[in-house]
Image (cartoon, grey):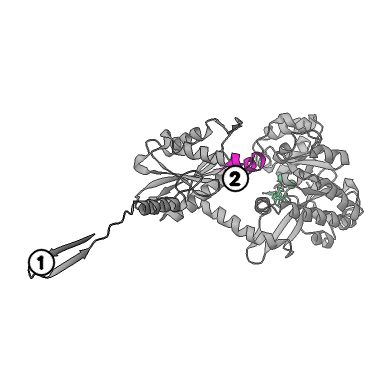
Amino acid sequence: MIVSYSEQDNIDTTLLVQQFNIDERKRKELALEKDVITDPLTGLLNRRGLNNAVGQKDSFVIFYLDLDGFKLINDSLGHAVGDQVLQHLAAKLTGSELKHGLACRFGGDEFIWLVDEDKLTTSIEATANLLFQVMNEPFLDNEGRPIKISASVGIANYPADGNDFNELILKADAAMYLAKKQGKHRWVNYISGMENTLQRHSMLAQYLYKALDNNEFSLHYQPIINTKTNTVDSLEALLRWHNSEIGPVPADECIKVAEEIGVIVALEQWVIATAIADIKDFQKVFGNQIKVAINVSSHFLANSASIDFIVQQLAVNQQNISSINIELTESALLANLSHENNMAQQFNQQGIALSIDDFGTGFSSLAYLDQIPAKYIKIDRSFTNKIECDSTMLIGIQHLIQSLGFNTIVEGVETLQQAKILQEIGIELMQGYGLARPQPLSYYQQTCNLANLVLKI
Ligand code: C2E
Ligand code: MG
Ligand code: MG
């Protein structure tokens, strides 16, 4: 369009005006902007979108959700069903009951539901329960199969728990991690210091990957003493990990991290191979009847090649099957009891003696006890340290164990007084710092007077 006009000084000026319709371009720009902050599968805000949205908020609470067993859904029902689960959850998180908050797909199967503090109409606990209630509503996939959605949730508060959004995410993640560890399908409110466990675990994990190759593991052996004959009945192999930078790491912490990062089977194979190879040296010290007790985890039980590995190690070292006991906790055993001819039965068929470790600490019911072909039951030390005041509980447990035909071992005997009470109750096999502490093989080889190992009761 060309426009001409005259100004006061009569100079002709021509103005060229061009008009374009930029609606389409704007629409595309807006769509592009939206794409950058939106998750394409669920339509929720993505991580960047949430970060922008949080911008100027003064105080808010985040609920950090991580689906439980999502990999299993993907692997067993296929990725299309996995996508439906994510879309379903997204719809729930933006539904009428939760619309006062902001939902975001934060990663693969991780979601965040964020709510301004002043929009919280109920307590954090009640809100978390509402979140679970909404998530748990039955859901059918496209083929009509019922799918159960379960998540572990970590909760953190801004500004109380973190100075900025990223810090808050770390805190909520730590709380969520704990919710997973405590058995999943639950929520945990962040409390100060929680992330240190997470940081320590990931630090340990880095070192643990290399620890086997670097020969950082060793075994200490703690005698289980027959206080009637005053002899060493067996020796329990206990893992020791010493790294030159981080120092000694407690056995149960090391096992936990090894389970998390998937090196547990390799580590337990090392323990088994080393303990079985050490038997011949213990036989020189204690005689041929000595046994070595080896702890194994539920991961070891879940692997059908485990028994073959033990049998093979015994053969390589020319040892009899009666020279080992395998120690398993109640929960490890229970996880494996469901099917017929389970691993506990297979151990039994092979003639390998089983001990139920830390008895009394699990959540298990007594109903399973007569299904387990164990030879020994090791009563946890939490019962031992009470017996000086009241031994009723321990006496009851001992009667139960005896009537079911198991042998009792009591753990954590720290004083001679405890040992005496146990003897009076009729318990002969005991283990504890008050009798003998865990020591390396070399200690037993160098100790000339074996009587020193066993305190006279
Ligand atoms: P556990 O199998 O019940 O082993 C007994 C634990 O109690 C050992 O701790 C031992 O040092 C400690 N203990 C012995 N007597 C006393 C006492 O009188 N008082 C107190 N307070 N403690 C006593 P440790 O060596 O730190 O091992 C802890 C746990 O780690 C073990 O408990 C076992 O569950 C696990 N563990 C150790 N080595 C292995 C292994 O090679 N494989 C597997 N899967 N787990 C292992
Ligand atoms: Mg044990
Ligand atoms: Mg124990």
Main SS type for the magenta part? Answer: helix
Residue drawn at x 80%, y 54% is 453
Question: Is 146 displayed left or right of 17 in the figure?
Answer: right
Pick the front one: 17 or 205: 17
| Quarter that holds the N terminus | bottom left
Residue drawn at x 44%, y 46% is 62
Magenta segment includes 76: yes
| Kind of residue at disc 2 | Lys
- Measured as percent of width and height from the top left, residue 76 is found at 67, 40
Vertically, is 50 above or below 364? below
Instruction: Please rate how many residues cluster around mark 1, counting C-alpha atoms within 10 Å: few if below 14, some from 14 to 19, many from 20.
Output: few
Dot in front, 1 or 2: 1
| Kind of residue at disc 1 | Glu
Instruction: Let me know if residue 68 appears in the view.
Output: no
Residue drawn at x 41%, y 33% is 96
Question: Residue 181: which disc?
Answer: 2
Instruction: Please rate how many residues cluster around mark 2, counting C-alpha atoms within 10 Å: few if below 14, some from 14 to 19, many from 20.
Output: few
Q: Which residue is mark 1?
A: 7
Q: Which numbered disc flags the more N-terminal residue, 1 or 2?
A: 1
